[in-house]
Image (spheres, rainbow, N blue to C red):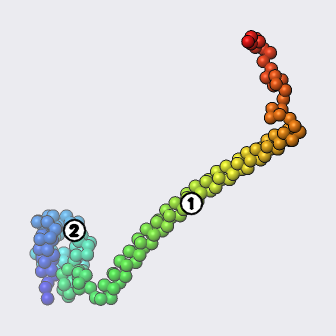
Amino acid sequence: MATKQQRLKDVYAYVREHYGIHTQIDFAKALHITRPALSSAMNGNELYLTKNLFQKICAAFPGVFNLDYLLTGEGSLLVPTTHEIPHDQQAFDYAFLIEKAVDKATAYADKTIASLEKQLSDKNQYIERLENDADLKNRTIDLLQSRIRELESYISKYQHNGLTDYPFPIGVADDHSDQPPVNL
């Protein structure tokens, strides 16, 4: 089993390779500790190889290092990847992803339904306007037909009484007294 010092050196080697941390000064800054404290830990001083140090490492690189391994030496340096997660955890993760996908699909369906309902409402309002216009035109036609019947009745009444097509004597309706007489 690796010592605490060796586990710290393994962490340092990993962050140098994967995180572009090239000096102990950079590593100490990432952990929010002093360089001398880090140097003392790297040199194996047990006063600096504390639980707090290893917690700071895990906090600075979340989801990367296995805190249990850093503290006890049991397990692996890195947090298990999804391939190493037990099947129950994978099922939980898949269920979570499916739930998120269902929520997203439901939100999209709700948005689509709202849009279609708005379109339907607009179409219904348009149909109602057309029906109102048609109703107005039908009433106008009925009124005109009624007026035509009245005029036909009026004409028929005069024709039946033996009157000419023109119900007034010639000249009465054509009074142009304000105009000078026309000489023929």
Q: Label 1: which residue?
A: 121
Q: Label 2: which residue?
A: 31
Element marked by disc 2: helix
Give the mark toward the camera: 1 or 2: 1
- Is 144 on the left or on the right of 121, as rendered? right
Dots 1, 2 in contact, CB < 8 A: no
Element marked by disc 1: helix
Identified at 21% across, 84% down, the residue is: 69
Give residue 92's position: percent from left, percent from top.
Answer: 35, 84
Identified at 14% across, 70% down, the residue is: 18
> Cα distance, mark 1 to mark 2?
61 Å
The dot on residue 173 is: none
Give residue 87's position: percent from left, percent from top.
Answer: 29, 89
* Quarter-of-image position of residue 173: top right
Q: Which is nearer the eye, 143 or 136?
A: 143
Residue type (three-letter) at the residue carrying disc 2: Leu
* Quarter-of-image position of residue 184: top right
Residue type (three-letter) at the residue carrying disc 1: Ser
Is residue 17 visible in the rendered structure shown here?
yes
Identified at 58% across, 59% down, the residue is: 124
Q: Quadrant of the N terminus?
A: bottom left
Relative to 47, residue 178 above or below: above
Give residue 17's position: percent from left, percent from top.
Answer: 11, 71
Give residue 181's position: percent from left, percent from top.
Answer: 77, 12
Mark 1 Cα shell of 10 Å, populated few (<14), some (14-19), many (≥20)? few
Mark 2 Cα shell of 10 Å, populated few (<14), some (14-19), many (≥20)? many
Is residue 125 visible in the rendered structure shown here?
no
Q: Which is nearer the eye, 172 or 136?
A: 172
- Is 18 on the left or on the right of 164, as rendered? left
Q: Which is nearer the eye, 1 or 172?
A: 172
Identified at 15% across, 75% down, the residue is: 11
Label 1 vs 2, first from the N-terminus: 2
